[in-house]
Image (cartoon, coloured by chain):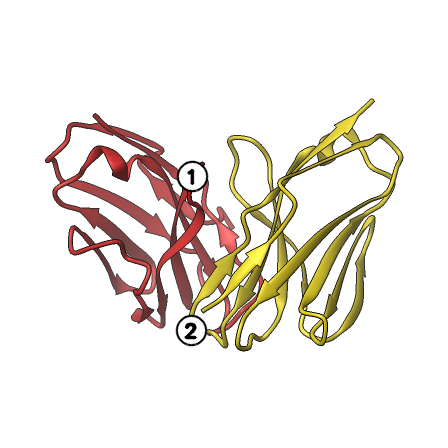
Chain colours: A red, B yellow
């Protein structure tokens, strides 16, 4: 298996622009997670899907952030409009089961908003 | 809510044994996980404790004591490649996941 796939790997955009991050989970995994990592705030869970349904989105910072999972093999995280404070590495992870302890992380997307 | 505490940095020499502690405050959880992250890389799963006691996986072991709200990761026969950040994490009954701040381990020759 190719593992969790994320695109793009790097994104540089200007403040106010829309950013879309993409994730393909490992085939057969039914839980998908979006995380954000910064030096200041560490690794934060943004949103968590199980069987394509959002279970917990309490970590989504504000209305500028939205996430979708239209099917079992694809998810997007969208930021509109983007702000410099959104600059971070965004990780997608997947796992088997609702409360699986073993999450497989993608390589991450490094987002820079200028 | 949940909060986890870890030492920010730990330094040890090759071949030594090092213990990375994790204390937590949470109303309840399924278990305690540990992840490793090298600079510029993604977190990778190391171990999981659902029950109190020691779990061993090769050179790495992890321990949990729910009564003490405490866990640790034990790394034996340290190698240079073990230099990385280590995170503990708890899952709140599948509702959300919280990672600790991470411990940066430096292994010296």
Crowding at label 1, few (<14), some or many (≥20) Cα neighbours within 10 Å? few
Viewer-proximal residue, B18 or B94?
B18
Q: Assign a secondary structure to mark 2.
A: loop
Viewer-proximal residue, B107 or A72?
B107
Which disc number belongs to residue B95? 2
Q: Residue at x 52, y 35 (%)?
A: B41
Q: Which residue is mark 1?
A: A40
Q: Within the image, what quadrant is residue B49 found in?
A: bottom right
Q: Where residue A41 sits: x, y (%)?
A: 42, 44
- The alpha-carbon separation of the residues under discs 1 and 2 comes to 24 Å
Q: Where residue A15 sits: x, y (%)?
A: 14, 31
Crowding at label 2, few (<14), some or many (≥20) Cα neighbours within 10 Å? few
Q: In this picture, is A60 found above or below B31?
A: above
Q: Within the image, what quadrant is residue B9 found in?
A: top right
Q: In this picture, is A106 found above or below B104?
A: below
Q: Chain of mark 2?
A: B
Q: Residue at x 29, y 56 (%)?
A: A75
Are both tags, 1 and 2, on one chain?
A: no
Quadrant (top left, top right, bottom left, bottom right) of the C terminus of chain A: top left
- Quick check: A21 left or right of B102? left
């Amino acid at each position: 298996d190719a593992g969790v796939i994320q695109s793009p790997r790097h994104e540089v955009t200007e403040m106010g622009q829309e950013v879309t991050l993409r994730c393909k989970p490992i085939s057969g995994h039914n839980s998908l997670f979006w995380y954000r990592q910064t030096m200041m705030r560490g690794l934060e869970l943004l949103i968590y899907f199980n069987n394509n349904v959002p279970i917990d989105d309490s970590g989504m910072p504000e209305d500028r952030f939205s996430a979708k999972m239209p099917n079992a093999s694809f998810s997007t995280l969208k930021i509109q409009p983007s702000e410099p404070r959104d600059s971070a590495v965004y990780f997608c992870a997947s796992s088997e089961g609702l409360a699986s302890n073993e999450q497989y992380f993608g390589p991450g997307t490094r987002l820079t908003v200028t | 809510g949940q909060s986890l505490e870890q030492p920010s940095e730990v330094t040890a020499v090759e071949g030594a044994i090092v213990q990375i502690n994790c204390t937590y405050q949470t109303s309840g959880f399924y278990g305690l996980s540990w992840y490793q992250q090298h600079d510029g890389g993604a977190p990778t799963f190391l171990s999981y404790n659902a029950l109190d006691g020691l779990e061993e996986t090769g050179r790495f072991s992890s321990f949990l004591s729910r009564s003490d709200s405490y866990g640790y990761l034990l790394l034996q026969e340290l190698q240079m490649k073990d230099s990385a950040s280590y995170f503990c994490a708890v899952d709140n009954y599948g509702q959300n996941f919280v990672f600790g701040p991470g411990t940066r381990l430096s292994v010296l020759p």
